[in-house]
Amino acid sequence: MKKYLPLSIIVFVVPLNALAEVISCTSGFTNRQVEVGEDQINDGYCDCPLDGGRDELETGACSGSSSWAGAGLENRESHEGLDNYACPRQPNLLLPPSRIHDGICDCCDGSDETANICEDFCGVILAKERAERDELVRKFNQGSSKRIAAVQKFQRIYRKKRVEIEMIRKEQIPALESAMGKKKQLVIEKKEEFLTNHLKSVKDILENVFRHNVIIPSSVENMTEFLAAVCQIHGEITHDNLPEKSKGNNAHVCKPIILAGMDLGILWVFAGGETKIRVDDDSVVRSDIADRLLGGVDLFSEVSNGKINTDTKEKEWVDPEDAFVDKEDDYFHNDNEHRMDTDFDDYNYDTNANPINDISKKEDTVVMKLSKFARIMRGPFLKQAKGMINDMNSILENSSADDKIFDDNDDDVSSPSLDPMAFQMNINNLSRKVERIEYGNELGMSAVALLQLLEEAKNSDKLYHDLANLAVMTVYHALLSLPDVIEIFTVIHADIDADLDADLDICYSPYTKLCNGAAFDFTSGDQIVTVPPEGLEKIVGDRCLTRSINAHGCSNNDNTSLPLSNIPDGIFNYFESKSRPDGDFYTQSFKVYQDTRLQNSIFESFMDSISTTQHQIKELKSKLDETVKEFGKKNDSKYGPSGELYEFRDECWDILAGKYIYEVCLFGDARQRDNGAKKGGTNLGKWKSISIDKETGTRELKWTNGAKCYNGPKRSATVFLTCGAETKMVSAHEPNICEYVFTMESHIGCDDFFKLAQNL
């Protein structure tokens, strides 16, 4: 407490060296260095307020005013060799020379002024200081105890986590990886054993099949035609049950050939838009074949350096319920989507084409290539069906507003009265048949491309042998029956011109020859083949009973056209393809094959075990990463060097300032909300870091990159945390636009740095 004295008793002490002197000091108004001449010294004007009032030591002009530029600088260090005065009972209070004997009692005991001038107020003043210091000591002691307990608790947790980290890294993961390595090696050995047995089983089955004089073309050219026809019929059989039939190139590849190839140690690989062929002359290919045969890998997965990549082309998932059109509803779709291109003069069969790389969703205007079988057995029906679809669509388009296609009183008796629903049902029925045939033909064309690759890769001396085996296995996987095979054989050997200029109006029926009750011979390469084979006459006879009788419109001189409704099976010699029955020759011949495949379910347990181990390793590595990230690699931790922030890892604090509540969350966000609001608010920033001022012990916690201010910076928040017995926010300020500053007390600030700074 300062006490002002009457001017009448002020005593001035004038140093002798203050006279006749030029002083250099800092101006209190311009902050520039100025020279104060002899005539300005002790003239009653303070020229050097920032340098202890050196120019007015005799007048005291530089003290006693709260408005002058040098006010409040009593603790500044003196300059030019002038020492500050320390109050004896207040050692932290330092006075510049200008404050000595200036008539104002600065020290509580008045020691800065002449004796007996000032009253001694030290009792009152020091009691207050002692109370404040005692409170500071109390807070520090309480806070320090809590801080030590929290740090010790963290250290125990930290040591436990470090042991856990080392155990996961050095014991658990290596043990699982070693176990998985052994399992993988066992699988490799089992796969090799499986493939060896499988290939031998297939070889035995083929030998048995060929002993029954199975019908197989005896030339490479006819074998290609034969396999294209097999894939054609397979496509027609499976079309309606393939939800992915229109998605991606793989849906247009004849899978039975791929499966048959693997049964013989041949692998077609689809990668990067290219198709390549590999044979089982190395362990990698054998392993890849085994993986596919066992069902562990998709048929069309890419293979690179012996590792199968199943993620290169993720197939679009299709709900099975969406794969089938509700026939009842589809009848009412009148949108011309079934209008077909009927220019069959462009249909051709090019053996040099490679449709695998360019088959895609086929537009109606794209020229479709037909194999010989498809041209003879499907071409006439396709032409009639597409023409009829276009005609019926035209009639629907030209129908009157009341949807009556023909007036009941129309004088033209050649135009029957039909309703739109019947027309639409017929369009849909024909369109489904056309789609089946065209999908089958795409599979047939893919077979040609696959066989070209095989022909290029295989020795010509072994090519026919491989094709013969491939043909039998493809028939099995394609679900064809023996009568289907005999029909194909008969057609591809028929003396019918199927070149580009052939007339698709000609309808050839293989049943004319098959069903005359007598066997006949075909020349197949250098061999004479008898059809039907000995012992299979009844099977062919049963087929003849149904198809020769039910065939419609297959006379070269017949002007038959498709009826407008109730299209019978067999019209223009087109019978819908069906899967072979259980009692078929191929079903019985391959029963051993199927039994062998069923025995391989043991591999599922191997793969499940490996998958489980891989999952365990993945979880452990994830746990290891999370723990290391949280507790650091060695002595480092996101909770600070001593782990002082650990107990606050999930906590937030708030303070009400004005109409807003400010909230900061450790390792989370800082927010500003209207008073009363529980959620939302303006984002002031995300947690960034903590730093410690070692001179004061103050912690600086930062949140940055908050919501952007209008025409300003992004918001940020800073908390200055110091020692306190309780953790709480004390104040909130916005010193600069969108920069929020808070003060906070907590026991985590009661450390040695704070103790030293406060001289506790």
Image (tube, rainbow, N blue to C red):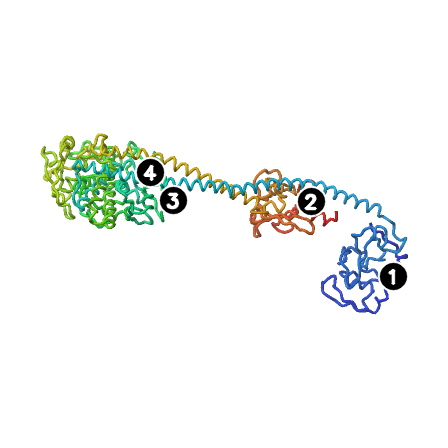
Please name which of the two marks, 1 or 3, marks the residue nearer to the observer: 3
Q: Is residue 47 above or below residue 567?
A: below
Mark 1, other Cα within 10 Å: few <14 / some 14–19 / many ≥20: few
Near-viewer residue (253 or 150): 150
Please name which of the two marks, 4 or 3, marks the residue nearer to the observer: 4
Left or right relative to 750: residue 557: left
| Marks 4 and 3, the one that precedes in the sequence | 4
| Marks 4 and 2, the one that precedes in the sequence | 4
Mark 3, other Cα within 10 Å: few <14 / some 14–19 / many ≥20: few
Q: Amino acid at mark 3?
A: Asp
> Measured from the top left, where is residue 606 in percent x and y?
39, 37
- Badge 3 element: loop
Check if mark 4's residue and mark 2's residue have beta carbons within 8 Å: no
> Measured from the top left, where is residue 123 in percent x and y?
84, 46
Q: Amino acid at mark 1?
A: Val
Query: Does residue 611 show up?
Result: yes
Specify the label residue 13 is tagged with: 1
Question: Could you give the CA–CA distance between mark 1 and mark 3, rounded to whole angstroms?
Answer: 95 Å
Query: Does residue 394 show up?
Result: no
Near-viewer residue (344 or 564): 344
- Badge 4 element: loop
| Marks 4 and 1, the one that precedes in the sequence | 1
The residue where tag 4 is placed is 294
Please name which of the two marks, 1 or 2, marks the residue nearer to the observer: 2
Left or right relative to 212: residue 291: right
> Which quarter of the picture shows residue 183?
top left
Mark 2, other Cα within 10 Å: few <14 / some 14–19 / many ≥20: many
The residue where tag 3 is placed is 311
The residue where tag 2 is placed is 750
